[in-house]
Amino acid sequence: MDESVLEHPLITFTSDFGLREEWVGVVKGVIYSINPRAKVIDITHEIPPMDIGKGAFVLAAALPHMPVGVHLAVVDPGVGTDRGALVLEAERGDLLVGPDNGLLLPAVRRLGGIRRCFFIENPAFFRQPVHPTFHGRDIFGPVAAHLTLGFPLEKLGRFGDVNGLTEPPWGPAKRGEGAVYAQVVDVDRFGTLRLNAQPDDLSALGVRRGDELLIMVAEETFRAPYLRTFGEVERGKPLVFDDSSGFLGVALNGADLASRLGAKPGDAVIIYVPAAR
Amino acid sequence: MDESVLEHPLITFTSDFGLREEWVGVVKGVIYSINPRAKVIDITHEIPPMDIGKGAFVLAAALPHMPVGVHLAVVDPGVGTDRGALVLEAERGDLLVGPDNGLLLPAVRRLGGIRRCFFIENPAFFRQPVHPTFHGRDIFGPVAAHLTLGFPLEKLGRFGDVNGLTEPPWGPAKRGEGAVYAQVVDVDRFGTLRLNAQPDDLSALGVRRGDELLIMVAEETFRAPYLRTFGEVERGKPLVFDDSSGFLGVALNGADLASRLGAKPGDAVIIYVPAAR
Amino acid sequence: MDESVLEHPLITFTSDFGLREEWVGVVKGVIYSINPRAKVIDITHEIPPMDIGKGAFVLAAALPHMPVGVHLAVVDPGVGTDRGALVLEAERGDLLVGPDNGLLLPAVRRLGGIRRCFFIENPAFFRQPVHPTFHGRDIFGPVAAHLTLGFPLEKLGRFGDVNGLTEPPWGPAKRGEGAVYAQVVDVDRFGTLRLNAQPDDLSALGVRRGDELLIMVAEETFRAPYLRTFGEVERGKPLVFDDSSGFLGVALNGADLASRLGAKPGDAVIIYVPAAR
């Protein structure tokens, strides 16, 4: 990474560790042991246990707004198996550190794609002994910390084939004839359904702000306009909008759509563009 | 702000964003992009969604104990409407940044009151494009970060009329003849009822430590002494005390009063000073 | 503490304050008021209210992985009574700050034991006035901050007798004939039972990796092998393993053992080493 990054070494940190146990603090302690000048920004540690899909979504939503830096992400159901451990260098200059299970891919694609990919294999960068269930503390955290000290990627391990990386549990939405075939990837605190679909998916179908759409989700079908923000519909009414994550959101103004529908991550969502257009 | 503040630029951060999504981390990322030397202290992000009253209480409780600095607060049900965006300069020297919905007022009054008030209007200090539902990321956070760099308030926007600001959903308790008419503003983790009443409200009625009071809350009436701390009553017994927030608290020693009574924020509380005095 | 610690002054912070109220932020504000260069690492603030046992466990699990520094811990049901306030200097060089209720002892023993013990008594290091229910803000936090500035321990108060300290609610597991008598000290987010027993307790009985054990907990008895990690048993099957905390864990691969058994902290656990060995 370039010099300015080393001057203000930043590590963002995302995990499914929760905040009740000591795990998040311990990883930070290990990081500061290696680089006392590092600054760690928590993105979230409340990814539901083992939920790679939500972890990948949150990273994709967050990283474009972060300064160029090192991004540590640990949602790792395969810890202790032979799943690979990755450092992905993004075209923007960031370094993403985490398991090879799809967690990092949607985010790195939003940072311009992968410039170089390395499999972490050099135990000189690990905390010893490596505990078989806590690679966040003993492998990923220490590697992230060493990267903020300017160690070159080549020292970490072997060069990896970008095409061989494990894909995340969700990909882009599919565009059909007059419809977008999507899924709920996240339900946020306000009950908004956050989809894998993006604003481009609607504009490709000629949808413009103010158009009415037909939404099918969780066995319910309803009409909702495509608008800029909540206040443009009456309280309790649905809308489709560009969520701040950069993905499409479906929500009610002032109410919790997910609870109303019983919708949850993984549910299929079809957005029909009425033929009338 | 004065030089020493710029040397150790501090931003406290309070919101209703919760910790499950990426929002808190993203705002910090934007802040550090603008001022990598800033230090952000989280006050809480678990204000219940849209609960301006609790947000205002927590800020009022916290800011007097904070170093002079910039205080960012986002509980903003009116995001995307034409509600104003504020920077309030406190007499103590602090700068409070947030929406004009009452959130900032109890706190700034505890910092000596408002010295100057500005409406944020200059898009040069925003992150572009401004997302209509995430002013924390695109307006309030960037403005707070720029303030730690020493930008003068005058550059942010137009001078505001202090008398025209939106009041918070709760004001001071009312003093009557031999009674204080208050309300529950917050129920804390230990089940303490935190009121809008303050110790002054009791001393104005001649109440002294050790006096017995009659409390009416949530359709229950009970006697409780006014004491310094929990251990001065038997386990399970009620007391009124000066909460660490600077407001009055009503609680049980070693038990959860709010659950016992079914009391919740917004409930009326009357504190009677028995006539016998 | 030595010079390098003062150069990068670190305070870890553990409490039962929760994240909903202003308390954690307020303590940090007070710390930064005293030493703006301090760096605070949260270990957790979600210790269940007043749960000294879990607090002691989490500290013992975390501190060995932290850089040498000041460790602030507040789980303090006796606040406002005459329980003592401690600074324990560990053989490793750390300074542990908290109430004399057993909270600090398992951790300091893992840092080599106590080199010196002081009772905090000098009000010059307190924030005044000291609130009777918030010693975290007014005593422990300020003392921790002053320690990062290099104030000598002798200034804090009187030298304490290590043998007179209050013991924590759990001690080491007991080794019997062919059995370890332990208890559940913590149930983690993944449903693992974390015990007061340690790997040494098994090796002292001649147990080796791969051996099958008989576990009795919460009125259930089941067989479980002693393994390195989850993936070595089928999904849904139990195992005993060295938890990353350094204590023994009992868990199911990919499922929540605590919920399955209805097990909770405080439950007795007996690990039998089958006679066949």
Image: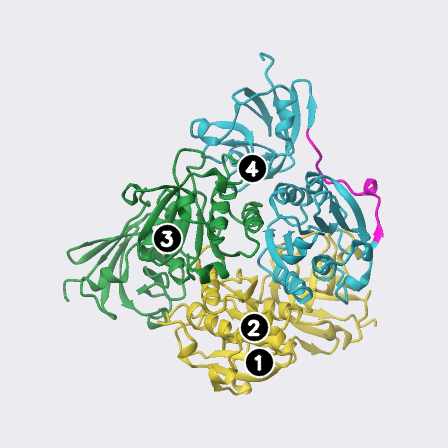
Chain colours: A cyan, B green, C yellow
Q: Residues within 10 Å of mark 3 (few under 14, many from 20)?
A: many
Q: Is residue C182 above or below residue B223?
A: below
Query: Could you say where residue B68 lies in the image, as x and y percent from the top left?
Result: 41, 60
What residue sits right under mark 4 in the picture?
A244
Residue C171 visible in the shown view: no
What residue sits right under mark 2 in the picture?
C70
Q: Which residue is more in the foreground, C119 or B33?
A: B33
Marks 1/3: CA–CA distance: 38 Å
What residue sits right under mark 3 in the picture?
B57
Image quarter where the C terminus of chain B lies is: bottom left
Q: Are marks 1 and 2 on the same chain?
A: yes
Q: Earlier in the sequence, mark 1 or mark 2?
A: 2
| Identity, as a three-letter code, of the amino acid under mark 4 | Ser
Judging from the image, what secondary structure is the residue with disc 3 in?
A: helix
In the rendering, which numbered label is found on residue A236? none
| Identity, as a three-letter code, of the amino acid under mark 1 | Glu
User: Residue at the location (52% across, 32% down)?
Assistant: A251
Mark 2 touches mark 3? (CB < 8 Å): no
Q: Is residue B257 above or below residue A227?
A: below
Q: Which residue is more in the foreground, B258 or B227?
A: B227
| Dot 3: chain letter | B
| Quadrant in the rendering for residue A183 | top right
Q: Is residue B203 above or below residue A239?
A: below
Q: Which residues are magenta?
A: A158-173
